[in-house]
Amino acid sequence: MYVLVTYDVNTETREGRRRLRQIAKTCLDYGQRVQQSVFELKVDPAQWAECKAKLTGIMDTTKDSLRFYYLGANWKRRVEHCGANPSLDIDGPLIA
Amino acid sequence: MKQHLNTLFVTTEGTYLAKDGMAVAVRMEKKTRLRIPLHNLDGIVCFGRVGVSPSLMAICGESGVTISMTDAHGRFRAAIIGYSPGNVLLRRTQYRVADDPSKSCEIARIMVAAKLANCRAVLLRAARDSRVESRRSTLTTAARRLVTNLEAARACDSLERLRGIEGEGASTYFEAFSAMVNVPEDAFQFTSRSRRPPLDPLNALLSFLYALLAHDARSACEAAGLDAAVGFLHRDRPGRPGLALDLMEEFRPFLADRLALSLINRRQISASGFTTSPTGAVNMNDATRKTLLKAYQVRKQKTMLHPFLQEKTSVGIMIHLQARLLARHLRGDVDAYPAFVWR
């Protein structure tokens, strides 16, 4: 399945900046960064459960917010990109 | 069920692959060009001079991502794989069957018959699509001759004779192969297989596709817990993945040959994409290789109905399913190995 993860992390404190870094790192382990605080994850349900548990463990529920958009299997029809930094199609041919 | 995961192909010389979190970072000229989470990958294939960091090798071994190192032409050199999965009892059974000529022959005969049937299907499909009468008759004649081989293979009880039948069938098939090429370019006409080195563009295409298929067959064997080196039709030889080659046979016509033909016939690949070295060896250039890799990946993602399991799967997973069916047969859960026969 395809999940879109976006976040707002309060970075006023040092702790907040740390959480921001950790959340970004965790998201990067599971998917790709498409914008500053927007990630696209192609995961199976088990991997998603793992990822979600990690993310919610890092966040401070009183200060930060996380949003998960479940795009399902038909995500290709639901995502359109305009402008710079187009994302990588993880299902497409990967040739470097 | 195993998921069909993607394969990363690294064709640019001098690239360095490193571990970045739980992902592969593809670095070129010290810049990260691509970053792919490992759980989205099944394997990484590196062509030519490509560096891999030790920590990436370690994590790939752990998480079951095979790294294959091949030379620039796709010929296999080395692989980095983790512990053999599966079950030692299965592997022991595999060795016992491989040691028993009559039991080996039983499996090999099904594989050869499936290969010949698939060759025949490819010829007939091309004959149906062809508009030129002379070509059509060449193809149907070859297909008719294959029926004889097919019947002989089905009744064969010696491995030696089976190899002979297979060779005979292959030469009939490849003699008619050029009749399936619909472009006027002479470069894509050939009469027989040549390898090490391939002496014309079509042979170069086929060799490269077979190398890709061998990589996939090998990982399918490993993933099913079988020993890729011990085959039934192909005899043991150091460094040769006998079982992977066995498993490949039934897929060659359907997956590799048809892909090569359609790339040529749709003019996605032309004769100008190849270079001939002074030794007569024909190589493809970078652009051609990329087109080929892309087409192969796209082909593997197509879904089709598995003829035996009656289940919809992707073409890429088909070879994994065959490896699993073979394992099931060795375990004694299926009476005979149900080879993949394309309809």
Image: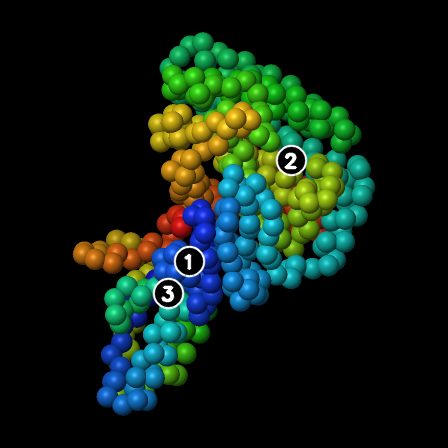
Query: What's the residue type where badge 1 is placed?
Result: Val
Rendered position, A72 above or below B74: below
Q: Which corner quadrant of the image does residue B265 belong to?
A: top left
B342 relative position to B163: left or right: left
Q: Give the residue at mark 3.
A: A31
Name the N-terminal-most of marks 1 and 2: 1
Residue A75: % across, % down? 30, 57
Q: CA distance from mark 1 to mark 2?
A: 39 Å
Q: Give the residue at mark 2.
A: B111
> Is label 1 in a helix, a strand or a loop?
strand
Residue A25: % across, % down? 38, 74
Residue displayed at 41% across by 69% down: A29
Label ID, residue B26: 1
Q: CA distance from mark 3 to mark 2?
A: 40 Å
Q: CA distance from mark 1 to mark 3?
A: 15 Å
Colour logic:
rainbow
Residue B297: % across, % down? 43, 44
